[in-house]
Image (cartoon, rainbow, N blue to C red):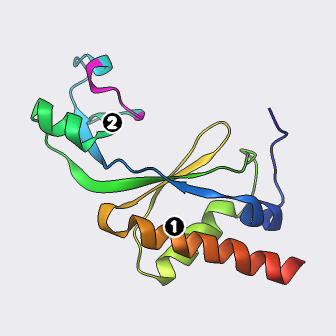
Amino acid sequence: MPEAERDLATLLIAMKPALDPREWVFCQVDRALDLSELQPLLTYRENEGVTVIVERAIADARGLAYAFPCRHITLRVHSDLYSVGFLAAICGELAKHTLPVNAVSAYSHDHLFVPADRGPEALHVLEELSAQTARKVL
């Protein structure tokens, strides 16, 4: 596994965003529900219930209520969990384009969830941010 990166410019230049073709949704389910049937991409336990991000087709098939139909973008650079400003720079740039984003940091990569109909636009914004940073630094 490559060493995790902390340098902000390096992270922005090397982020290599990848857009997942599937559509995802956020659901809140009962703690007693067998989550294995939902094949969640993400699970987070809150006092109000369990939040899961699942494919929209699975939520529809199971009759689950959901919010925020979205596309998933993986930032393929191995970001260090101690890096400073990476998601702030990305979320700030997306905000300039009035693009809502829900960001999640995992062990190796950061992940963005953007409105389903604006996934390609968000990908383009991120690729431009990466290219602009490279032009400034190189």
- Report x, y in % for residue 21: 39, 51
The residue to which callout 1 is attached is 123
Which residue occupies 68% across, 62% down? Answer: 86
Q: CA distance from mark 2 to mark 1?
A: 23 Å
Residue 46 quadrant:
top left
Residue 4 quadrant:
top right
Q: Is 94 placed above or below 63 here?
A: below
Quick check: 79 left or right of 98?
Answer: right
Q: Which residues are magenta?
A: 37-42
Q: Quadrant of the C terminus?
A: bottom right
User: Label for residue 52?
Assistant: 2
Which residue occupies 73% across, 45% down? Answer: 78
Quick check: 130 left or right of 29?
Answer: right
Q: Quadrant of the N terminus?
A: top right
For marks 2 and 1 on the same chain, the one whose residue lies earlier in the sequence: 2
Q: Is 5 placed above or below 34 here?
A: below
- Report x, y in % for residue 24: 32, 47
- Report x, y in % for residue 42: 42, 35
Which residue occupies 25% across, 41% down? Answer: 27
Disc 2 is placed on an element classified as: strand
